[in-house]
């Protein structure tokens, strides 16, 4: 097998060749048909997250070890199965759930592997899909995405798809009964708007400073859009919602967006924070109980949530985000393009096609 590895942070990835691994126990070996290049791969390659205010979060301090084959948005064709692996056979095409935990702690047992403190996330802590082959530890992490989606269309569901869906699930029944304010109409926001539609939710109000993105949000199904820089943005949101706001998801996560969301919420309202842009807000503590306010963070999504999402979109795929496919050898160029802000939509590597 060939893989493209980060050997030193911020330096060009290197090719590595080795004999195809032989799956043991419950393991399954896939030929990688699609490996999405995610924005977070840029940070993994650089080796740190910028937390703002001069603070950085080093990934090696968080347990990321080099050399690492990145790639956490993968679709593959089963090439070999371990002697104890059940439920898949050679030739099956599957989407891989990458947010794998230790499997033994209480968090994992509750089904929230994405929150495990001993993570084995594929493409982050374990080798991922920037390779011709990918070893997956257990068949339940392989999801049948049906025949209506191409591999490059299904792959991002493992990251942006399940992240948006996981945030929506935290709003509970509000998705059906109230409009959801979706802050940030980038990739995640647009997928979220499309999922709200697929869930037959009440609808989405999109918030973005960029008029082009607001238009894209409308095309994705948002019934109203608001410019957060407008002096009366709160009033505009409440007018669009025909009353105070019950539910908001912040895919940006900066001081301004967070403040806008908090100011718009009604008593009992919920704000889910996903974006990692950075900053802070001042919150009057008595307002949390008086307004019975929920502010909750959300990080990717659970295996159960990805299964639910696949069930929702398997026969009615979400509208296709502009997607470009390219060879494994081009991975470094794609990372450079992401860094330069030149990627529109998504780029997906096709290592074994
Ligand atoms: Zn991702
Ligand atoms: Zn665990």
Image (spheres, grey):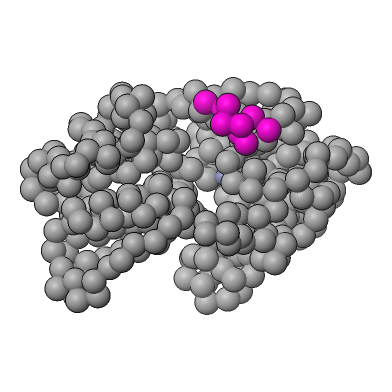
Q: Is residue 150 visible to us here?
A: no
Of 112 and 218, which appears nearest the observer? 218
Q: In this view of the protein, which residue sits in the foreground, 50 or 120?
A: 50
The reply to whether the magenta stretch includes residue 19 is no
Q: Is residue 234 above or below residue 32?
A: below
Q: Looking at the image, which is closer to me, 317 or 332?
A: 332
In the picture, measured across the screen, residue 344 lies left or right of residue 212, that is: right
The magenta region covers: 336-344
Q: How many marks?
A: 0
- Whole-percent x, y for residue 195 in the image: 34, 39
**Where does ligand 1 appear, by image quarter?**
top right
Q: Is residue 269 above or below residue 234?
A: below
Q: Is residue 130 visible?
A: yes
Q: Residue at x 27, y 39 (%)?
A: 229
Residue that appears at 36% across and 55% down: 255
> Where on the picture, by quarter, is residue 36?
top right
Q: Which quadrant of the structure image shows residue 290?
A: bottom left
Q: Is residue 161 above or below residue 172?
A: above
Q: Quadrant of residue 212?
A: top left
Q: Would you place residue 31 above or below residue 114 in this image?
A: above
Left/right of residue 290 with respect to residue 91 in the rendered view: left
Say which residue appears at 32% left-offset and 27% top-offset.
211
**Residue shown at 33% from the left, 51% from the top:** 256
Q: Could you tell me which quadrant the C terminus lies in?
A: top right
Across and down, in percent, residue 140 comes to: 58, 54
């Amino acid at each position: 097998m060939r893989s493209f590895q980060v050997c030193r942070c911020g330096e060009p990835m290197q090719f590595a060749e080795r004999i195809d691994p032989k799956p043991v126990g419950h393991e399954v070996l896939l030929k990688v048909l699609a490996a999405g290049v995610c924005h977070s791969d840029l940070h993994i390659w650089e080796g740190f997250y910028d937390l703002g205010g001069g603070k950085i979060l080093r990934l090696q301090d968080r347990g990321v070890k080099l050399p690492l084959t990145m790639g956490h948005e993968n679709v593959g064709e089963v090439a070999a199965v371990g002697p104890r692996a059940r439920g898949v056979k050679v030739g099956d095409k599957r989407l891989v759930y990458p947010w794998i935990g230790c499997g033994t702690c209480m968090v994992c047992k509750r089904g929230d592997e994405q929150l495990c403190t001993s993570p084995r996330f594929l493409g982050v802590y374990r080798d991922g899909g920037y390779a011709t082959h990918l070893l997956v530890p257990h068949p339940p992490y392989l999801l049948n995405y049906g025949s209506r989606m191409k591999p490059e269309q299904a792959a991002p569901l493992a990251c942006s798809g399940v992240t948006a869906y996981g945030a929506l699930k935290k709003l509970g029944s509000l998705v059906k009964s109230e409009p959801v304010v979706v802050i940030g109409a980038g990739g995640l926001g647009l997928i979220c708007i499309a999922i709200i539609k697929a869930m037959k939710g009440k609808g989405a109000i999109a918030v973005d400073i960029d008029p082009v993105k607001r238009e894209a949000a409308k095309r994705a199904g948002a019934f109203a859009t608001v410019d957060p820089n407008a002096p009366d943005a709160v009033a505009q949101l409440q007018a669009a919602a025909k009353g105070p706001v019950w539910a908001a998801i912040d895919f940006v996560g900066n001081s301004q967006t967070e403040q806008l969301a908090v100011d718009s919420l009604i008593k009992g309202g919920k704000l889910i924070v996903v974006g990692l842009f950075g900053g802070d807000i001042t919150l009057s503590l008595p307002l949390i109980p008086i307004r019975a306010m929920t502010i909750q963070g959300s990080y990717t999504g659970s295996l159960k949530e990805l299964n639910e999402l696949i069930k929702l979109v398997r026969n009615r795929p979400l509208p296709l985000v502009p997607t470009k496919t390219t060879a494994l050898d081009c991975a470094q160029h794609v990372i450079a393009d992401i860094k330069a802000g030149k990627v529109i939509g998504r780029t997906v590597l096709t290592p074994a096609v």
